[in-house]
Amino acid sequence: MAEFIKIYPDKPSESAVAKVVKVLKEGGLVIYPTDTVYGLGCDITNTKALERIARIKGVKLEKANFSFICHDLSNLSDYVKQIDTATFKILKRALPGPYTFILPGSTNLPKEFKKKTTVGIRVPDNSIALEIVRQLGNPIVSTSIHDEDDVIEYTTDPELIFEKWQNLVDMVIDGGYGELQASTVVDYTSDEPVIVRQGKGDFETKPESFENYPDKLVGDQLLLNSGRIILSAKTGEMMFYSKKNYGFISDGAMSIDNKGGIDISVKDNIHIVTNNRDFAIHSGKGSIFLGDTELEPLVKGKKLVEILAELLDAIVAQNYLTPSGPSKIGPENLPTFSKIKSKLNDILSKLNQTS
């Protein structure tokens, strides 16, 4: 029967962790907490323990897709082929965290995994798991105890986990309730990363490819505070992506100077607000288009007023044929025309102008 041991995640007891490490070194199987669901693990250097896990999971050891639980990325080269700097930065920013990264396996994999071309790397954000691996001195080979056919409580409640697994493993750690979601699995073995399984965590390969954005912030915010900040994409594109609002705030002027075109595409409305300031669009020798179908030219306000005034004067000066002979507009109608003419400037906007 397995031993049931309580370890507090806030400050894992070194003596309690030492007991876990002793079981692992002796070839035992341990169920332990992670930052997602509880995991079933063993010492990566113990062949018999690896075979036991494979039997429990009902798979052949050489074909099993187990994860390597590491303390950090310092020994990554022992199990993974050399990866580029951009990918390493992504791993470094995302880990510890609820992610499993599938990476190209190196030739230094343990003999049980020599035929594997890929390896899953995990650095869980859980103090108990990390301390166990640290004291053990090498990774734990691990698999999730999560089973889609099981009652949900078996995944989260360590006491219920113990009841189910006590005759299959050597130790069950009570590190508090587990999560309902497994880790998010991201495949980094091809040109672009692919999310194989969406689990806990908000890791995204979009827009287009997470690999194209190696400096994506993992956290709440990015603060740049300097006398002058220059962002330069020398040969490629510069893209900004936000799930929510995207804003620029400046106490002074804000300029966008571009030799090519500027495209703004939105699914909803565009609001441009200037408080007591001008909003100007200059197109140089080009044209400015508002709308994209049945385009018509804009009217020049001052020119329109000038033409309408001339038209009114011409109407007033016009001679009209009457039964008694040629006649101008009667004096009683002149005030009406004069009043209309005086209002012509009212059609001109005091705020919006065009050229």
Image: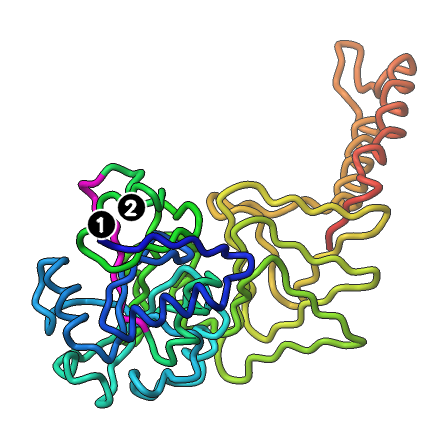
The residues bearing labels 2 and 1 have C-alpha atoms spaced at a distance of 6 Å
- Residue 341 at x, y = what percent? 86, 29
Locate residue 142 relative to residue 122 in the image: left or right. left
**Which contiguous range is marked in magenta?**
140-150
Q: Name the residue: 14% across, 73% down.
A: 48
Q: Quadrant of residue 20?
A: bottom left
Q: Quadrant of residue 163?
A: top left
Mark 2 packing: few (<14 Cα in 10 Å), some, or many (20+)?
some
Mark seen at residue 256: none
- Residue 203 at x, y = what percent? 42, 60
Q: Which residue is mark 1?
A: 165
Mark seen at residue 161: 2
Indicate the amino acid at tag 2: Ile
Q: Name the residue: 31% across, 73% down.
A: 188
Q: Is 5 or 330 nearer to us in this picture?
A: 5
Locate residue 45 relative to residue 226 in the image: left or right. left
Please tell me whether mark 1 sits on a helix, a strand or a loop.
Answer: helix
Indicate the amino acid at tag 1: Trp
Task: Look at the image and tell me in which quarter the C terminus lies.
Answer: bottom right
User: Is the residue under label 1 in contact with that under label 2 (CB below 8 Å)?
Assistant: yes
- Residue 65 at x, y = what percent? 19, 67
Q: Residue furthest top?
A: 323
Q: Is residue 147 magenta?
A: yes
- Residue 344 at x, y = what percent? 83, 32
Q: Is 11 or 212 nearer to us in this picture?
A: 11
Q: Quadrant of residue 103?
A: bottom left
Locate residue 278 relative to residue 209 in the image: left or right. right
Please tell me whether mark 2 sits on a helix, a strand or a loop.
Answer: helix
Q: Is residue 29 magenta?
A: no
Q: Is 277 or 120 nearer to us in this picture?
A: 120
Q: Name the residue: 31% across, 38% down.
A: 153
Q: Name the residue: 27% across, 65% down.
A: 41
